[in-house]
Image: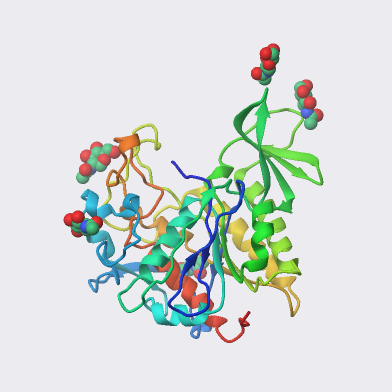
Amino acid sequence: MMLLSVLLVLVLSAYSPEQIFLYPPMPAHNSHQTAINSPHDNAKACNLFNGTWVRDFGGPIYTNTTCPTIPEARNCAKYGKQMDYVNWMWKPHGCAMEKFEPHLFLTIVRGKTLAFAGDSIARNQMESLLCLLSQKFYQIAVIKDLDTTLQAFPVEDSQRQINGTVVEEHDIHLDKLDPRLATNLHQINILVISTSRWFFRRNYLYEGEELIGCIYCSEDNITSFSVPMAIQRVFRTALKNLKESQECRLQLTVVRTATSAHFENGLWNTGGSCNRTEPLREEAMIDQTEWAIRNAQVEEADRTKKNNGKGGVKIEIIDITKAMSMRPDAHPGIHWNNQWMRGYSDCSHWCLPGPIDMWNELLLAVLNKYKNSLEDQ
Ligand SMILES: *[C@@H]1O[C@H](CO)[C@@H](O)[C@H](O)[C@H]1NC(C)=O
Ligand SMILES: *[C@@H]1O[C@H](CO)[C@@H](O)[C@H](O)[C@H]1NC(C)=O
Ligand SMILES: *[C@@H]1O[C@H](CO)[C@@H](O)[C@H](O)[C@H]1NC(C)=O
Ligand SMILES: *[C@@H]1O[C@H](CO)[C@@H](O)[C@H](O)[C@H]1NC(C)=O
Ligand SMILES: *[C@@H]1O[C@H](CO)[C@@H](O)[C@H](O)[C@H]1NC(C)=O
């Protein structure tokens, strides 16, 4: 619901570790992506993405009073949500997760530009990162959030017009990188990309200007693509283009896998809600479509990695699909400032602080792996 199409770019710019810039907006309207990744030093013995949530009463490293940038819509505590959902820690099988270390993070990204491209869930991760970095010791010199509404695809898309009226259908060009992303790539060193909810609507897919299929259409003469199939094609193209992009500074692309919404007893607009108060156990069901999308993302990231010779942009994955499928308790639900949508639950985004902070612990683990190989720019 209300997954605004936003290409959000966070730039941790780099003159000093104390400076954070939110990257300027791209002119038009689209984009997308994710990034994912794996481990650091104990990487061999440990799959950071396979584990369970265990009790941890240590408390989050920030609160709604210590994080000055916490968005109203994610400040669930303020709107009455019981905060037990912060008392869980992700525990990968066979190893421990490192807690987020703001200083380490800022040291690694120093001199680099980190960007998140995607929809409002990607933005949610960026918001979490800003809060994690907002502890009192780290004064944030500059924050500029110059985002604009963008369409959330990694590849070029345009909204269809019928008789001059924009309709909720899109033409997606699988072989062209989103122009806004392409235009700004020259300034980005580390890019976190994800998929978006925007695929879940009627879309027409093109390759080399040829219509090759569509999603959610039932036109006899057009090949029908499932959402995961379409996302697979999009990722293949986007990752290949990113990997091969020559004249840019991009050094690392991180694919963040899909994350499920947890509406129960209805959809977002038919009274669905999410009022569970505990994580689900590991064997809990993962939404099959979400899992298929995650598999497509992992496959394409692996494929691009394999085809990667020595050089080229590195690809990593942050595979949060399984972990987050277990956290129906950590969405805002009815606890947000939904004046214009009174009574509707938000079971897609994640409360801050909350388990989405773990995505940035994983991001740090990934970055830490490259800490000596990311060149200064
Ligand atoms: C995750 O861990 C469980 C328990 O150790 C194991 O049964 C399962 O195969 C693992 N899954 C993956 C994808 O590694
Ligand atoms: C922070 O959350 C508490 C509930 O834990 C709430 O009472 C308070 O109003 C919130 N403060 C801010 C600044 O959001
Ligand atoms: C477009 O406009 C024309 C003329 O007003 C109308 O006859 C036609 O049905 C419209 N087509 C669609 C798809 O709305
Ligand atoms: C598919 O069939 C419809 C109706 O016959 C036609 O208008 C449309 O142009 C056809 N599309 C393609 C790609 O052939
Ligand atoms: C949770 O929501 C359902 C409706 O979806 C409602 O019937 C139930 O009473 C709610 N439970 C709590 C504890 O609020």
Inspect this view and state whether residue 309 appears: yes
**Residue 74: where, in percent of width, then height?**
33, 53
Q: Is residue 37 left or right of residue 52?
A: right
Specify the quadrant that holds the N terminus. Answer: top left
Ligand 2 falls in quadrant: bottom left
**Residue 263: where, in percent of width, then height?**
38, 43
In this view, 83 is above or below 249: above
In this view, 377 is above or below 160: below
Q: Is residue 280 left or right of residue 277?
A: right
Specify the quadrant that holds the C terminus. Answer: bottom right
Give the residue drawn at x 30%, y 75%.
136
Q: Is residue 58 left or right of residue 150?
A: left
In this view, 140 is above or below 350: below
In this view, the residue in front, 253 or 5, is: 5
Name of the residue lying farthest toward the front: 141
Give the residue drawn at x 56%, y 68%.
317
**Residue 205: where, in percent of width, then height?**
71, 41
Q: Is residue 151 left or right of residue 332?
A: right
Count of number-bearing discs: 0
Give the residue drawn at x 65%, y 61%.
184
